[in-house]
Each structure stands twice: as structure tokens, then as C-alpha cells.
Amino acid sequence: MSDVEFIHDAVSRVLADTVTLASIQEAENRKVPIRLFDALADTGIFLMLAPEEYGGVNANLSAALSVLRASGAAAAPGPVLETILAQRLLTQAGLDPTGGLSTLVFAQPLDGPAPGATFWAAPPPFHEVPWGGLAKHFLVVWDSGTGVRLVVSDCSAWRAVPGADEAGEPRDTLQGENIPVTCSLLSGASYDELLRTAALLRAGQLLGAIEWTFNCSVGYAMERKQFGREIGKFQAVQHMLAELADHTLASAAITMAAAERCTDTMVAAARSRVADAADAAISIGHQVHGAIGFSREYALNYRTRRLMAWRNDYGSVFYWRHRLGAQFQNLSRDAFWPAVADAGLSSLPTR
Amino acid sequence: MNATTLRLELPTLPPAADELRREVRSFIAEQRADGRLPPPTKVGLGFSAEMTQRIAARGWIGITWPSQYGGQARSALERYVVTEELLAAAVPVGAHWVADRQSGPVLLKFGSEEQKRDYLPRIAAGQCFFCIGMSEPQSGSDLASLRMRAERIDGGWKLNGHKIWTTNAHRAHYIIVLARSSPAESSRHAGLTQFIVDLKSTGVTVNPIVGMPGEHDFNEVLLTDVVVADSAMIGTEGNGWNQVSAELAYERSGPERWLSSFRLLSELIDALDQQARPASLEELGRLLSHLLSLRQLSLSVAGMIERGLTPNVEAAIVKDLGTKFEQEVVRVVRDIVSVEHLTCHGREERLRKLLVHAQLWAPAFTIRGGTNEILRGIIAKGIGLG
């Protein structure tokens, strides 16, 4: 079994063992899911994108996507994506991965610390930082206009104004002055490329939650009886679930393809397509479940609320749609098809 | 759980397919340079016997069939590449489309050796066009209720009945007729048989049906005491339903379901300039994301067909999504053209014509080749409901 397969198996086991309704609900009371994160750390998941010389696995994005898909399906709380990506960013900046609970933001402020700086005198406030007041490390990926910088600090150095997203998970504002930082140049990486990686991984979590919602809704429709038969026997219900099957399969296809080929076009397409699928999963999932799906005691809402919370992370849906439209906007009629056809294939015909 | 029954395979195209794609693109460039491929003002599959001849000369009709029947024994993925390149460039492929996509494959799978030797090489040579004899006035979505009668006579069969919505019956050579050859006793799907009928036979009448766009593509085909030999029967007597199901899977899985109005999107993109509003680009981006996703799904289906699987449910998903997508294309292009004033003062005349034509066709997208309601029934069954 390869390292990547081992991690995937181990993560699946950890998610099944530790993510319960009770543990998800605890996270909604600003409690760090320590048990989950300790168990996940043991699987090696957080170092999976880090290079081998830093003790990582150097897995590709498809492998990372598959574990985040599983975490999204399980509605796992906490900054899972952020902690994985942070370890890779640290190593890219030549720093040692900490493995600790991490959060991050992408920012384009006008001013910030220079590489080598040890203090950030007057940082702007950072809003809606996932677990900002409770994580250990806070990473700012800063597009300075003259290269990408990684500004690393301790979350505890900031004043956190608590906030929460639709799923009830913390999204805090971090503010402060004279924050001790490590500022490094992220050489060999562009801001857009790093943002794409984060956006793709979030798409993986969204996809997992969509697939879970689809499966759960089909299962419910086969069990729940009204008018003396399973509601899944009614054509109106069948057609809704067929539509959700369409959305689920289409978004899986584009997201998996984008992990293989993490270009601007493919990631933008994945994020736009998955957003439509998420909307369909929310409306159809709840419509099929009827009243019971609305209850906090029933599992559906934990996926629904995460779909709402994640949909516009790491580039809003409109941002990615606009970006995709703009890439094709100036093509001639005859150049359009080759651009579409060549976007999604790993072996490319050259003209 | 149930989603695992939906199959998805990321496509990797063999190097031969890339080479073939380059060949098809240079063929298209040549045709454009020679003035044989003017930018279209209509959506849908154009009909040109001359273009079909030129495509046949390149060996791209029946490309997957064995060489003894005029084919090239190439993979389903290679066929997929040829079809998507031709469709995206709006090459008029309508003359050979039905024969290449479904009539030929059905003969190859179920036909007699004599039928294969007779028809397949002529289809591959671009000389023999087929049309589909399934729908009837009283049998649309409920195909098994059809009334076309096949009565056994000495040495053959006598056919009586009425087919309708038959695309190209007025310019094709043969029609494959699905008929009831014995009463539906055990099941309503039993007792159906397929026959090849020469459209020049005595007793065949073809009447035009003009559609909403004002064109003659459809026909009704009346069969009155049409006599065919035993050798005209395809496959096994009474096995028609199974054979037609296989045929419909070919009919439903192809890229034509989301590429038939692609040229409208091409023209829109050609006409858009730097001044386009952010909202227009967002709408365009959303469409493109659906287009790119559909293509990944289509390639996945083509890959499964290549491996000998029958991805009927996944094909139904492609057609359900693809036809809805095409209707969205028409709506979004209309709205962007309007807000960006792209066709004012006589500008972009071709785009305007295409848009009018596409709007008139759009309601048919989700009906032809099986309504989306029928497709959703297939999908529901495939995910364990029904």
C-alpha cells in the first residue's frame, strides 16, 4: 500500500470513529476538536503535501483532494484544509512544518512586512479567518506586487473578535499592532497558483458534502413511506433525485479533472460548477427529506450548513466565474473550441 | 451507498487520438480555406452529401468498425475525438450521422453477415444514409406501444403502419423500422422486430413536416403493404426491444447533445470585446464551467464504451445535462447580446441569425432522442429508485 493510500484509509477510519454529531456540535461552541485533530495528525494527513525532506509525503493534489472529499462528506469540523495547506506553504518558504492547528488567509494589502522582518507594525484587520482566535499558527499569503510573501505569526499574538459561519464554526476577525512575525519570500510560487490550490481543495470538501447529501437523500427516499409506499417510488421525487445525480456526477468529473490539471481554467470551472451542485444539493436534499431534514438532531443540516459556509471561500463563486469568462472573452470563433478541448486533457495536441 | 453505482473515469486519450485530432483540425482548416465551410447561420447538424464524401475519404465514417466492413478498427475514444472536432467546427455531418452513430453499430452487433457486407462498406464510403423508424403518431415516449405491424408472408414480411418525426427520410436511402411482429403477450417489450426498408420500395410514402424554425427536416413515413425479404430482418425475431435499447444508448451518449448549438457560443465570444460587463462575463463563465464539466463526463462515457461497458445511466445523465445546457446557452447568449447591444445597427448579422435560429430549435433540445423526463426515469432506476 502506498503512503497516499495508507493516509486515505487511516483518515477514513479516523473520520468514522471521531466525527459524531456530538463532536460536530462541540465545535459550534468554539471548542477545538482536539481528539479529531490528534487522530488526524497521526495519519500523516497534515504533512501529505509537504516534501519528503521535511518528513512529508509529497502527495499530488488528487490525493489531497480525495482526503478532503472524505472530510467534507463527514462534515469534519476544524481547519483541516488550512492545516494541510499551511504545512506545504511553510516548507515552500523554507520553514519547518509545525504540524500544529493552522489557519490562513490570502491577502493583497497595500503595505506589509519585508522578507526577513520580525514585526508587522500596522497590519490591516483580517476578517472571517477560520478558527482565527483558536488555532495556533496564522499564515498570511500576501501578494505584495513584487513576489509572494508568507507572513507567519502566532494566533495568540492577535486580538480575536469572535465570529461564526453558517456551520457555526469560528470565523474570527484578527487585529493588532506590532505583531511578531516571520516573513519569507515564497519563491517559485505565484499568488494565483496558491489561491487555486486552496480553492481546489475547498471544492473537494464541497464535493464530499454534496455526495453525502445525494446518498443520504436516495437512502431516505427508499425508506420513508407515505401514501403506503416509499416516497422514492413517486415520479416527482425520482426526478428531483435524478437531477441531483446529474449535478453530483458533473461536479465530481470537473473537480477530479481540475486536481489532475490544476490550471486557472479548470479550477475556475470546478468552483463554478460545484457551486451550482451545492445549491441543488441544499434545495433537493431538504425537499426530499421534508421536515426531518430541518432538525438539528438529523445529520443533513451539518452538510447543508457547510455547503453554505464553504461555497464562496478562496475566491467567491462570482470571482471564479468572472475569471473563467475573462479567459475566453477575447478568443476568435475558431480559437474557442481548441481552448475548450485542450483545457481538460493531460496530453495536449499542439497546433 | 448509491452514488457508487454511478461510474466516473477520468479520460486519458491515447497518443493516436491526439494525432487524429490534429488531422481533423487540419482537415477543417483546409475546408475553411477552400471556402467549403462558411461560418454557419444555423444550429443543428447540416446535411451535405458532398461533405460526407470528403469525410468518408479520410476514413472517419465507421472508424471503429473492422476493416473487412470498410472501417479502421480504431477505438471509441478516437471516434469520440473525430465527432467532437467536427461538431464544434459546425461541419455538416447530418447525412451520415445516424448510420455512423447507431444504424451501423446495430448492424455490426445484431446483423447478419450478409447485411454487414452489404451495408457497412457503403456507409463507411459515405454513399448510404439511414434514418430512424421508431416514433409513431400514438407512440412517442411510450415506444413499446407502437402499432406498426409486421406480418409474416411467404419468404418475407409485409409491413403496415405510420412512422413520424423521421429526420432526413426525404434524403436518406434506408430506414430501420421497429414493428410489432407478434402480439405483446408475456411482456409489452416482447414481439418487436427491426427491419431495414429501402425508402424507394413500393408502398413507402414520405411526407414533409415543417418544424417551428420553418425548415423541412422531419417527415412522416407511411408504409402500406410494403414487402421486405427475410434478409431485411435485423437480429432475432422478437428481440427488437433489446436491440433498440442498445441503439438508444449510442444515440444518447454522444457529444452532439451539448455541441449542437456550440457555434452560437463561438459567435458570441467572437463578438464580445474588452468592454463586456462583469455580469456578462460571470454568466459566460458559468456556462463555460458547465461546458467543461460536460466534456469531462462525455469523455468518461466514451472511455467506458471503449472498455466494453454499457454506461446507459451515465449516458442518460450526459443527455439530461447536455440538453438543459444547450437551452441555457440560448438564454444566456440572448441576454448578453441584448445587454451588450452586440447586434445593433446591423452589426454581427451572423450572430443575430444564429440566435434567432437557435431560439426556435431550443424547445426541441430536451425532447428529441428521448425526453428528459424519460431520461430522468432511467437515471432514477439506475440509482436504485423505481
Image (tube, helix red, strand yellow):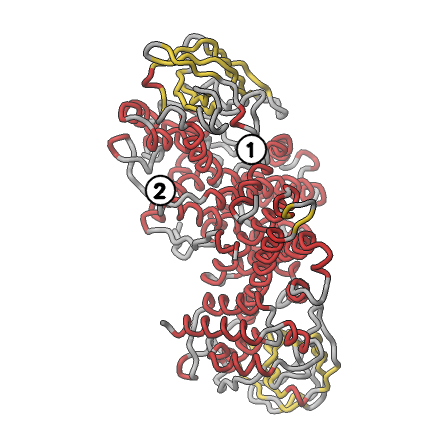
- Circles 1 and 2: CB atoms closer than 8 Å: no
Give A175 or A67, whichever is nearer the viewer: A67
Q: Chain of mark 2?
A: B
In front of the other: label 1 or label 2? 1
Q: Secondary structure at mark 1?
A: loop
Q: Residue at x 51, y 42 (%)?
A: B316
Q: Position of residue A349 (x, y in %)?
A: 39, 51
Q: CA distance from mark 1 to mark 2?
A: 24 Å
Q: Residue at x 51, y 24 (%)?
A: B167
Position of A85 with respect to A133 (left or right) is left
On the rendered image, what quadrant is the N terminus of chain A found in? bottom left
Q: Residue at x 64, y 30 (%)?
A: B360
Category of crowding for the residue at label 2, using alpha-carbon neighbours closer than 10 angstroms: few (below 14), some (14–19), many (at least 20): some
Give A124 or B228, whichever is nearer the viewer: B228
Upstream in the sequence, badge 1 or badge 2? Answer: 2
Q: Position of residue A258 (x, y in %)?
A: 50, 60
Does residue B290 show up? yes
Residue with the mark numbered 1: B43
Q: Which mark is residue A275?
A: none
Q: Secondary structure at mark 2?
A: helix
Q: Position of residue B146 (x, y in %)?
A: 52, 22
Position of A319 with respect to B381 (left or right) is right
Residue B119: quadrant of the picture: top left
Name above or below for residue A328 compared with residue B152: below
Q: Amino acid at mark 2?
A: Glu
Residue B237: quadrant of the picture: top left
Q: Amino acid at mark 1?
A: Val
Q: Position of residue B41 (x, y in %)?
A: 56, 31
Residue with the mark numbered 2: B23
